[in-house]
Image (cartoon, rainbow, N blue to C red):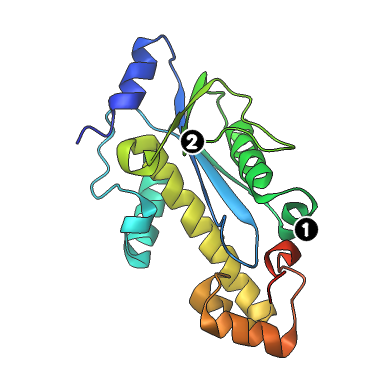
Amino acid sequence: MDLWQYEREAAQAGYDLVCGCDEAGAGPLAGPVYAAAVILPLGADIPGLNDSKKLTEKKREALFPIIQAAARAWAVAGVDAAEIDATDILSARMKAMQLAIDALEVCPGFALIDGNRDRGQTAAIRTPHRCIVKGDSLSASIAAASILAKVSRDRFMLEMARDYPQYGFEQHKGYGTRLHYQALRTYGPSPIHRRTFLKNL
């Protein structure tokens, strides 16, 4: 599979700097949604690069500094639980991705966005872009962004596990596991829980 097809097509269309963008943490009951944007040199060799969901935690952690070193630019951004509750998760995802793109040290002319959505009710991708369904498996730069976003969010949730040890965030990273629901029934929501995700609790 050619993981550079979409980057190559964008370059042929005249875009010198193309970033991949992906988010992590759309589904959890707690914590922020994170996004990353990565500009890789076309054809950069990063052995093992793949969709973060197809990699072990150990492999993602190993690839994290390799991607950072290889990238022409990279950035990570997040939108917290309170803002997710105040808007909606789709808007928060779009805002996080655009924030990550805007935080890049060099401005990309074009963005490759994972998924089939580029706007929510209150936020949209403003950078010229193309949405790619399953892009984290089809584009090298989106795959790299998926890893940076996932690792960054997981690290944040490990910090939250120390602040709120009763919820077991170190085990489930905020996702709706049986353990997590049991803790919510016992202790109620923490300040980092998404209240709009707990309506059926």
- Give me the residue at 63% from left, 79% from top: 162
Q: Quadrant of residue 31?
A: bottom right
Q: Quadrant of residue 187?
A: bottom right
Q: Secondary structure at mark 2?
A: loop
**Residue 148 sits above or below residue 151 on the image:** above
**Residue 110 sits above or below residue 141 on the image:** above
**Between 87 and 129, which is closer to the camera in this rendering?**
87
Q: Amino acid at mark 2?
A: Asn
- Give me the residue at 68% from left, 82% from top: 184
Q: Quadrant of residue 104?
A: top right
Quadrant, the C terminus: bottom right
Q: Secondary structure at mark 1?
A: helix
- The crowding category of the residue bearing disc 2, from other C-alpha atoms within 10 Å (few below 14, some 14 to 19, many at least 20), is few
Residue 69 makes an appearance in the image: no
Q: Amino acid at mark 1?
A: Ala
Q: Mark 2 and mark 1: span between their CA atoms? A: 25 Å
- Mark closer to the observer (2, 1): 2
**Between 21 and 199, which is closer to the camera in this rendering?**
199
Whether residue 82 sits left or right of residue 52 in the image: it is right
Label located before the other in sequence (2 or 1): 1
- Give me the residue at 22% from left, 32% from top: 2
Quadrant, the N terminus: top left
Q: Residue under label 2, please give it.
A: 116
Residue 59 rendering spot, x and y as whole percentages? 32, 61
- Give me the residue at 75% from left, 66% from top: 195
Residue 164 makes an appearance in the image: yes
Q: Residue under label 1, please give it.
A: 82
